[in-house]
Image (tube, rainbow, N blue to C red):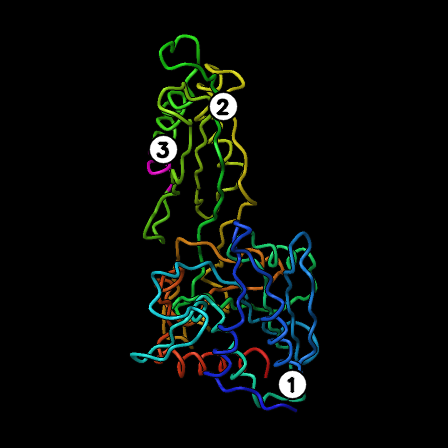
Amino acid sequence: MDKLPNFTDALKQLIASTSISSTQSSWDQGNKEVITILATWFEQLGFEVKIQPVPDTDNKFNMLAKLGSGEGGLLLAGHSDTVPFDENRWSSDPHKIIEKDNKFFGLGTCDMKGFFAFILQACKGLSEKSLTKPLYVLATADEETTMAGARFFADSQEIKPDVAIIGEPTSLVPVIMHKGHMSHRISVEGQSGHSSQPNLGINAIEIMYQVIGQLIILKEKFAANYNNQAFDVTAPTLNLGAIKGGDNANRICGHCHLDIDMRSLPGMTDDELISLLSEALKPLAQKYPTRITFEELHPSSPSFEQKTSSELVTVAEEISGHSCCAVNYATEAPYIQQLGCQTIVMGPGSIDQAHQPNEFLAFSEVDKTDRLLVKMIQHYCL
C-alpha cells in the first residue's frame, strides 16, 4: 500500500488539483482529479468507495466512501469545488500551498478542500472491525454554483446516517440555522426609437425605475414583518445585484434586465417569496401588460434549521466548546438533512477567508480540528 500523505502533503495535493465551479463556462472545470485523489486515499484506508457522475453536469462527480456496516452512523460531508479567483489580487499562486505567518495560503484551504485533509488524518488507524456503526465520507460537486452534487445525493437516498457534519468554515462553531437563497432576473421589454421623439417609444429603463421602487418597498416589508433574532441580519434580504439596459444615449431603451437575490428565513418557503415578489410587481404588470417578466437564474437553495434540542447539537457544543449559532450564507445542509439525519455545519477556518484573495487556513486550526473529528467518530461510530 502506498504511504498516505500527512496533513500538509494532503492539503498540497488537493489545492493543486483545480476544480473551479462557475456559471461562466470560461472558468468552469470538472472535479474528477480531486475526486480520484480522495477515492485513492480512502480506498487505502479500507473504505468502500463509490464515484458517481452527477447528472446534467459537465465532468462533475460525487464520491461516497464507507467504512463499517450496519445502520445509522456518521456522515462527514463537504464540497470538492472552489470559486474562481482574481489572479492580480493574490500574492501567490492560488493552486500552490504557501506556508507563511503560521498559515496555509491557497484556494480552497478553508473553503473547503482542507476539511478532507483533516478527515484523512482522523481516519488513519481506524479499523472496520472496531466500528459499531458506519462512517461515511461524502465529497460533492458544484456547491459553489448549482449545488447539483448535493441535490443528486439527496434525491438518491442511498444512505441513512444518524448524524451528518458538513465541514464548511465556521471556526468549529456548530451552525444549526441558515437562510435560503434564490436569484431571479426581472426583464422589461420597451420599444426602442429615436431619443428626439420619446412619445413614439417606451423606455424600458423608466419602467425598471418603477420596478426598483416597488422592490425597495418590498425590502421594507421584509424588515417590518419577518424577523429571526438568531441572525445578525434578522430579516430576509433582497439585493439589487446587477442591471443592464440600452445601447446608446440617443436611443430609447428597448430592453432592461435586473438581477436580484433574496435570502429567506427558516420557515419561509420559495412559493411564499415568489408570491411576495409577484404581488409587489402586480400593479406595474397591470400598467404595462406583457412588458415585465421574471425568471429564475438558477435553482434555489432552501433555508436550514436543526433543532437545538437535537442530541447532535448537544454533543457538538460539548466537544467543540462553542454554543451553536445561525449564519446568513447558504450551504448543502438542507439537502443532507433530507437523508433523515440530524445535521450541523461545523468546520475549520473562518468564512471571512472564503471567496477572498489570499485565502488561508491558520496552523492553529490543525490540532483542534483533528481532536474534534476523532471525538466525533469515537462518539458515533466506535
Residue placed at 35% from the left, 26% from the top?
213
Please state the extent of the stretch shown in magenta in the rendering.
220-226
Q: How many marks?
A: 3
In this view, 317 is above or below 24? below
Question: Closer to the camera, 65 or 205?
Answer: 205
- What numbered label is drawn on residue 267? none
Q: Quadrant of the N terminus?
A: bottom right
Quick one: label 1 or label 2, which is nearer the N terminus?
Answer: 1
Q: CA distance from mark 1 to mark 2?
A: 57 Å
Q: In the visual, does 159 lie left or right of 186?
A: right
Q: Which residue is mark 2?
A: 292
Q: Residues within 10 Å of mark 1 (few under 14, many from 20)?
A: some
Q: Residues within 10 Å of mark 2 (few under 14, many from 20)?
A: many
Q: Magenta stretch mostly in which secondary structure?
A: helix
Where residue 30 appears, as percent x and y from the top left, is 60, 61
Quick one: label 2 or label 3, which is nearer the N terminus?
Answer: 3
Q: CA distance from mark 1 to mark 3?
A: 56 Å
Q: Which mark is in front, 2 or 3?
A: 2
Q: In the visual, does 359 lie left or right of 305?
A: left
Q: Quadrant of the C terminus?
A: bottom right
Q: Residues within 10 Å of mark 3 (few under 14, many from 20)?
A: some
Q: Quadrant of residue 224?
A: top left
Q: Under tag 1, what secondary structure?
A: helix
Q: Which residue is mark 1?
A: 44
Q: CA distance from mark 2 to mark 3?
A: 22 Å
Q: Which mark is in front, 1 or 3?
A: 1
Where residue 117 appears, as percent x and y from the top left, is 50, 78
Q: Which residue is mark 3?
A: 221
Where residue 136 appears, as percent x and y from the top left, is 62, 73
